[in-house]
Image: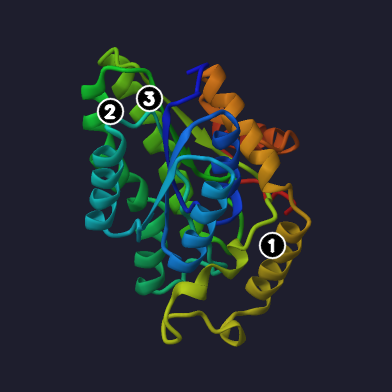
Amino acid sequence: MQNLAHKVAVITGAAEGIGKAIAQQCALEGMTLVLADIDATRLAATVTEFQAAGTEVIGQVTDVSKSADVDALAQAAFERFGQVHLLVNNAGVALAKNAWETTENDWNWLMGINLYGVTHALRAFIPRMLEQGEEGHIVNTASIAGLISAPSLAAYNVSKFGVVTLSEGLQHDLQLRKAKINVSVLCPGWVNTRIIESERNRTAEERSDPAKSDKVTTHTGMAVMQAVQAGMSPAEVARATLLAVKNNQFYILTHPHTIKGVEVRMQDIVQQRAPTLLPM
């Protein structure tokens, strides 16, 4: 989809971080924006910011883990603008826990946002995008953790591996139907966002207690925090994402050094050996 001007982009998790940066890049391309986020205050401020810059934009408060919210987002987008050309399923959260410490509530929260948030959007948007008969693109935000299994991130890894394979299957399904919609899966390494504060939107009872984590999980969590704080800027990720959309590039690996890790994992599988523990 080379020419993005005057086309409509829907972006979830759009009030900050990677989502907002992608929205900014879309605005630079002359796109109309439909921005979704669970944080009503930040979303309103973001919409106002884009409006002040002359971008046609609407905001929709959305909890992507709820299918009704995502259906309402699709309804708002199509009612206002009649069509959608770019769907960016970006909303996501993270949690540092090993598999046996991750509670049922943890799994439901993380999978609900990271994986089911994507599936809800595909059901809500793709049928109408197919009916348009126009060129379109879907970007699903996964992570390098969707290609390489890191320690102490059990539920996060599962959710992001799920987004990768969902995207791969979606690409096949659309190709078999000769659809004009293409797919990308975004797999960045460490990016300087507030993802380490993901639990801010959970209730006090649901939030993890760091004091209850073992030493390995605590150490890993600290390493992740430091890596995120020193990570790539969201703007760099956004530029790579829009370039991939224009070039119809499926896998978007924004951090070149992570490709080596993917190669090691592939060799682990081919040689049927235990997974290699890669550096954070």
User: Residue under circle 2?
Assistant: 129
Cα separation, mark 2 vs mark 1, equals: 38 Å
User: Residue under circle 3?
Assistant: 171
Amino acid type shown at disc 1: Val
Cα separation, mark 2 vs mark 3, equals: 15 Å
Q: What crowding class fits label 1: few (fewer than 14 Cα within 10 Å), some (14-19), or many (20 or more)? A: some
The answer to which of 189 and 17 lies nearer the viewer is: 17
Amino acid type shown at disc 2: Met
Mark 1 vs 3, N-terminal side? 3
User: Residue under circle 1?
Assistant: 224
Q: Where residue 149 sits in the image (x, y, percent)?
A: 57, 49
Q: Secondary structure at mark 3?
A: helix
Q: Secondary structure at mark 1?
A: helix
Query: Is residue 154 left or right of 276 when viewed as pictured?
Result: left
The residue depicted at 48 percent of the width and 55 percent of the height is 92
Give the number of the mark in front: 2 or 3: 2
